[in-house]
């Protein structure tokens, strides 16, 4: 069962989804690869949603907040591996898809990594923060 709430960001409205204990996804409405989940139950009162909204408020104020809530994106084993690498990139640094691919396997394609990056349901959290505890 998944729960959802909305967040009004300076860049547009967002959907936040949780399994009740962790954040499974944060998307801008209308973005490509919008939620893979169905049947959300609107629940604006979950404590974790308050934590995520506070984090987003701080981020949009120009701060570099640390994540103090659990992340649990849903995806294949390969995608989870790519997303874990993304969460370990230090704030202000970058890696190319090719560099990420080579960390996974010498024969991995950069295109496969690009596809996984495009489907990252928590990208705004893992790509914009330092010291993310994504599992």
Image (tube, rainbow, N blue to C red):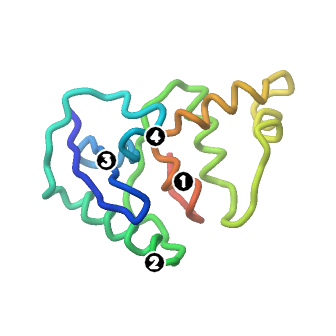
Apparent side of residue 120 relative to residue 116 in the rendered image (left or right)? left
Query: On screen, 5 above or below 80?
Result: below
Q: Earlier in the sequence, mark 3 or mark 2?
A: 3
Between tags 4 and 3, which lies in front?
A: 3
Mark 1 → mark 2, Cα distance in angstroms: 17 Å
Apparent side of residue 125 relative to residue 36 in the rendered image (left or right)? right
Q: Which residue is mark 3?
A: 15
Mark 1 → mark 4, Cα distance in angstroms: 10 Å
Callout 3 secondary element:
strand
Callout 2 secondary element:
loop
Tell me the tag on residue 121. Answer: 4
Dot 1 alpha-carbon crowd within 10 angstroms: few under 14, some 14 to 19, many 20 or more: many
CB atoms at circles 1 and 4 under 8 Å apart?
no
Dot 2 alpha-carbon crowd within 10 angstroms: few under 14, some 14 to 19, many 20 or more: few
Q: Say which quarter of the image contains residue 81.
A: top right
Q: Residue at x 13, y 49 (%)?
A: 43
Query: On screen, 44 above or below 59?
Result: above
Q: Earlier in the sequence, mark 1 or mark 4?
A: 4
Residue toward you, 58 or 105: 58
Residue toward you, 37 or 30: 30
Between tags 2 and 4, which lies in front?
A: 2
Q: Earlier in the sequence, mark 3 or mark 1?
A: 3
Q: Which residue is mark 1?
A: 126
Task: Locate residue 35, reporting x and y percent.
Answer: 37, 33
Q: Which residue is mark 2?
A: 61
């Amino acid at each position: 069962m998944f729960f959802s709430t909305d967040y009004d960001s300076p860049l547009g409205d967002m959907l936040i989804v949780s399994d009740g204990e962790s954040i499974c996804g944060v998307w801008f409405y209308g973005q490509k690869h919008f939620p893979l989940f169905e049947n959300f139950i609107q629940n604006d009162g979950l404590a974790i949603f308050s934590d995520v909204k506070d984090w987003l408020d701080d981020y949009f104020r120009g701060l570099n907040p640390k994540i103090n809530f659990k992340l649990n994106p849903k995806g294949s084993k390969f995608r989870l591996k790519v997303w874990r690498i993304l969460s370990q990139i230090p704030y202000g640094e970058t890696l190319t898809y090719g560099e990420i691919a080579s960390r996974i396997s010498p024969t991995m394609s950069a295109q496969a990594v690009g596809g996984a990056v495009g489907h990252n349901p928590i990208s705004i959290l893992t790509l914009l923060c330092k010291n993310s505890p994504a599992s």
